[in-house]
Each structure stands twice: as C-alpha cells, then as structure tokens.
Amino acid sequence: MNNSAEYVIARLRRILHEDARTAELGIEVRVEGLVVSLSGRVSSDEARDHIEEVVRESLPGFAVHNEVQVLPPTPPRVVEALGE
C-alpha cells in the first residue's frame, strides 16, 4: 500500500465517523488503485447503504465493493435482576 492509499483510507475513516448518516467506527477500508473495498458489520440495510453512499460521494472516480454485513442486534439472553 502506498502513501496515497493510506491517505484515502484515513480520509474515508474520518468521513465515515463524522458524517451524520454513518457515524461508523468499525468499518474496514481497503484501497487498491481506484477500488475501495468495505467490510465490517452494521445493524441495518440502511446503515450499509449509507456507508456506500458516503464513500461514493467522497470518491466519485473510485469503484466501491461493499462487503459490509448486516447483523441485526439480538436481545440479551439473560435478564439481570436489579435492586434485590
């Protein structure tokens, strides 16, 4: 990976964290040439789509491969008793 790829990755991570549509910290970003690959996990299709949208807006000349997985949150299995 060269310095320009490292710059693009750092820039995208900052944008994904700061953009109100995404505010994501756990997305892995890889850059090879003019291809951006995204991976990680989010809780909804909407979050996944917003991440791709933000990346496409930020890097209009790049192809985007969105491999982000949607894993809806699961309720806790054990209910903790409070105040006993």
Image (cartoon, rainbow, N blue to C red):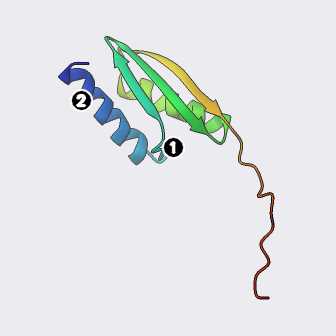
For numbered disc 1, what is the local secondary structure?
loop
Left of 81 or right of it: where is 18? left
Residue at x-position 77% and y-position 72%: 80
Res 67 → quadrant: top right
Amino acid type at mark 2? Tyr
Left of 42 or right of it: where is 51? left
Left of 31 or right of it: where is 7? left
Image quarter in which the C terminus is found = bottom right
**44 up-or-down from 39: above or below:** below
Q: Few, some or many C-alpha atoms within 10 Å of disc 2 (few <14, some 14-19, many ≥20)?
A: few
Q: Few, some or many C-alpha atoms within 10 Å of disc 1 (few <14, some 14-19, many ≥20)?
A: some
Residue at x-position 39% and y-position 23%: 30
Amino acid type at mark 1? Arg
Residue at x-position 50% and y-position 43%: 22
Residue 9 appears at what percent x and percent y?
32, 30
Q: CA distance from mark 1 to mark 2?
A: 22 Å
Out of 53 and 37, give the one closest to the viewer: 37
Residue 11 - label: none
Q: Which residue is mark 1?
A: 21
Out of 35 and 58, give the one closest to the viewer: 35
Left of 42 or right of it: where is 19? left
Residue 43 appears at what percent x and percent y?
65, 42
Residue 2 appears at what percent x and percent y?
21, 19
Out of 12 and 25, give the one closest to the viewer: 25
Q: Which residue is mark 2?
A: 7
